[in-house]
Image: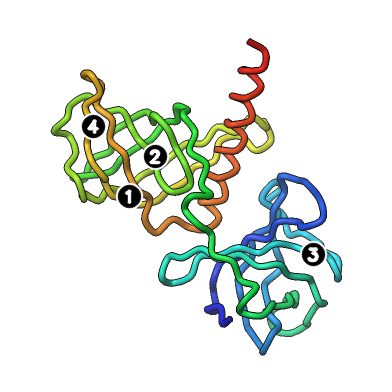
Amino acid sequence: MEIKLGTNLLLAPYDEETDEKFKCKVVDQQGDILFIDYPVSTLTHRTAFLMEGTRFRASYIDEAKIGFSFKTTIMGREKGNIPTLKLALPSDEEFEKVQRREYVRVETPVDVAIYRNEHYSQYVSEDISAGGLAIIASQADQFKPLEQVELTIALPFENREEGVKYVQTSAEVIRVIDQEGVIIVPLKFMNTDEIDKQHILRFCFERQLLIRKKETKI
């Protein structure tokens, strides 16, 4: 499968359980070899030294906004105008689509700034997933279905070193729901960067684990 130059890749270690992942960009492709720039750690934000032979699961979103993942191995380094790493590309049959049903939706409050009509307004989420979120509004006529807005989402991770991640994306209003006087507005993310989507996924999994821990203590 051909991957467009400039595509953002996220590499997750395949043989160990860790929160650290590595982001990079596709620089070139020659047959079944993919050339990427030197990856940067999502935890330290520094260039990472990855050993030849290390296995990863790589994920990306194509131009049609469809998510794909595949298993890969670092095959070596290439010196040139831009130093690159070589990744092995599997056969087309080994690429996997990332289905929306894999997204974990978690009921948790996060701060959301919405830009519309040349003005920012602050809201709090009812729930969130990598595919979208629902906010609590004060009035039912504040939003209209199919309306598109710009979002800035604050994700407060438990790890102090990681701190708060700010995700910026566009979204479309799905509908407006009146739940006994509480106005809920579900929004579907649009054009979300793959790295930002991974931040949301990790945040959702983290919150899900915290909720389960609290439930077991009750």
Q: Are marks 4 and 2 in contact (CB under 8 Å)?
A: no
Q: CA distance from mark 4 to mark 2?
A: 13 Å
Whichever of labels 4 and 2 marks the residue nearer the N terminus, that label is: 2
Query: Which is closer to the viewer, label 4 or label 2?
Result: 4
The residue to which callout 4 is attached is 177
Query: Residue 97: x and y, percent?
Result: 54, 64
Query: Residue 142: x and y, percent?
Result: 17, 34
Colour scheme employed for the rendering of this structure: rainbow
Q: Quadrant of the C terminus?
A: top right
Q: Amino acid at mark 2?
A: Leu
* Residue neighbourhood size for the residue with mark 3, other residues' Cα within 10 Å, grouped as few (<14), some (14–19), many (≥20): many
Q: Residue at x 71, y 44 (%)?
A: 19
The residue to which callout 3 is attached is 55
The residue to which callout 1 is attached is 171
* Location of residue 111 with respect to 182 vertically, above or below: below
Q: Quadrant of the N terminus?
A: bottom right
Residue 133's tag is 2
Q: Amino acid at mark 4?
A: Ile
* Residue sitting nearer the eye, 47 or 194: 194
Query: Residue 87: x and y, percent?
Result: 73, 75
Q: Residue at x 39, y 29 (%)?
A: 126
Mark 3 residue element: strand
* Residue neighbourhood size for the residue with mark 1, other residues' Cα within 10 Å, grouped as few (<14), some (14–19), many (≥20): many
